[in-house]
Image (spheres, grey):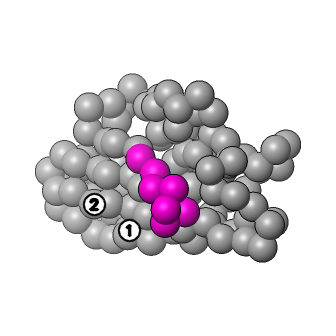
Amino acid sequence: QVQLVESGGGLVEAGGSLRLSCAASGGFFRFISLNDLGWYRQAPGKQRELVAVITTGGTRNYAESVMGRFTVSKDNTKNTIYLQMNSLKPEDTAVYYCKVRAGSTTYWGQGTQVTVSS
């Protein structure tokens, strides 16, 4: 079982920055063995969409809408995934979720709200 807790969301003006964190914990897992560590977001009335992911092979993939502005990273010593968000736009407003895969099981965090004012 893996528990994921996001933090770092909030209200920011357009052009500003935020860094989201996702701390993983659980009794029987090794953070380094988790796969497809990623961030998703869901805006009101829209489907949840992929924002950024670190694949099993270590490749970082981004949604086209955030490329060049967002950076996904991880710290194996802290069991934490990060999403650095720069040059934020009002259309980035959403609830952001982290997701990991342990074997064939997918785990989601509870989400953190990001609101970007114009």
Indicate left or right for 63 with 85 as reference: right
**In the image, what residue type sits under mark 2?**
Leu
Q: At x 32% / y 42%, what residue is drawn?
A: 70
Q: At x 39% / y 52%, what residue is drawn?
A: 83
Marks 2 and 1: CB-CB under 8 Å? Answer: yes
Residue that mark 2 sits on: 18
Residue that mark 1 sits on: 9
**Residue 75 appears in which quarter of the rendering?**
bottom left
Looking at the rendered image, the quarter that the C terminus falls into is: bottom left
Indicate left or right for 117 with 34 as reference: left
Query: Quick check: is 70 in the magenta stretch?
Result: no
Viewer-nearest residue: 53 or 113: 53
| Residue 82 x, y percent position in the rendering | 42, 55
**Residue 117 appears in which quarter of the rendering?**
bottom left
Looking at the rendered image, the quarter that the N terminus falls into is: bottom right
Indicate left or right for 83 with 37 as reference: left
Viewer-nearest residue: 80 or 69: 80
Can residue 54 be spotted in the picture? Answer: yes
**In the image, what residue type sits under mark 1?**
Gly
| SS at mark 2 in the image | strand
| SS at mark 1 in the image | loop
Can residue 22 be spotted in the picture? Answer: no
| Vertical placement of residue 6 versus 99, above or below | below
| Residue 7 x, y percent position in the rendering | 45, 71
Q: Which residues are magenta?
A: 73-79
Query: Quick check: is 74 in the magenta stretch?
Result: yes
Closer to the chain start, of discs 2 and 1, is: 1
How many marks do you count on the picture? 2
